[in-house]
Amino acid sequence: LAKTTQPISMDSYEGQEVNITCSHNNIATNDYITWYQQFPSQGPRFIIQGYKTKVTNEVASLFIPADRKSSTLSLPRVSLSDTAVYYCLVGLLIKAAGNKLTFGGGTRVLVKP
Amino acid sequence: NAGVTQTPKFQVLKTGQSMTLQCAQDMNHNSMYWYRQDPGMGLRLIYYSASEGTTDKGEVPNGYNVSRLNKREFSLRLESAAPSQTSVYFCASREGQGAWGYTFGSGTRLTVV
């Protein structure tokens, strides 16, 4: 999996938009960008995945520029319950189970009242 | 559906004791994984099982053994616990081949004194 770099932590306030940028300069042509969310005392859970341009679901949006060397996860109007660690992962569709998912340190987002 | 169930949720061991962490999934997934997460760190893969009857080492297998008992269950054993194995352990299973398909359990918090 390609190496990723993301901020260690970010603070925000309820109702604000939170944007987390992940750098992945050595992303390969066939690599996808996947984000997981981990609440305290829980395992990570998938939130969004994309290849290029913009992807949106009920939880977040993912913006990917044309060169794909970075991506931005956008959380609209955060609430206290969005306090979590967010992990950016970059890699090919994993065709074999042995291609394990490798998590870096993630970005710790703290939403304040 | 319960998803991925891990037992126990908490455990304290003395150095040198042994124990088995249990994991079961009810989603008919072929692949199962064991990760550990140390404070403020990302997840590191200990062992994985691509399918029933097969297991393989991940990044940090030393001091652990695993058993894929059947398609549903994947256990992790510590033969002689050490303080360095104090961590939160997560079991995961995966649907299909994509990075989005991982489902994690809620974790086992293990302390070795």
Image: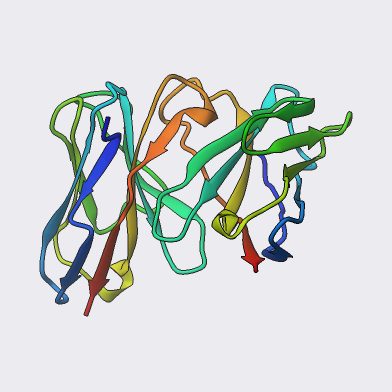
| Image quadrant where one finds the C terminus of chain B | bottom left
> Relative to residue A22, is residue A65 depicted above or below?
above
Q: Quadrant of residue A82?
A: bottom right
Judge left or right: residue A49 versus residue A63.
left
Q: Residue furthest bottom?
A: B113
Where residue A25 sits: x, y (%)? 80, 42
Nearest to the observer: residue A78 or residue B47? A78
Nearest to the observer: residue B62 or residue B99? B99
Q: Quadrant of residue B37?
A: bottom left
The number of numbered discs placed on residues in the rendered structure image is: 0
Which residue is at a point 18% across and 34% down the rendered structure image? Answer: B73
Which residue is at a point 66% across and 39% down the rendered structure image? Answer: A2
| Image quadrant where one finds the N terminus of chain B | top left
Which residue is at a point 54% across and 47% down the rendered structure image? Answer: A37
Where residue A93 sits: x, y (%)? 57, 23
Where residue B11 sits: x, y (%)? 19, 66
Which residue is at a point 60% across and 49% down the rendered structure image? Answer: A87
Nearest to the observer: residue A31 or residue A12? A12
Judge left or right: residue B56 versus residue A67.
left
> Relative to residue B5, is residue A40 depicted above or below?
below
> Relative to residue B15, is residue B81 depicted above or below?
above
- Report the coloring of the rendering: rainbow
Judge left or right: residue A56 versus residue A68.
left
Judge left or right: residue B42 versus residue A63.
left
Where residue B53 sits: x, y (%)? 19, 25
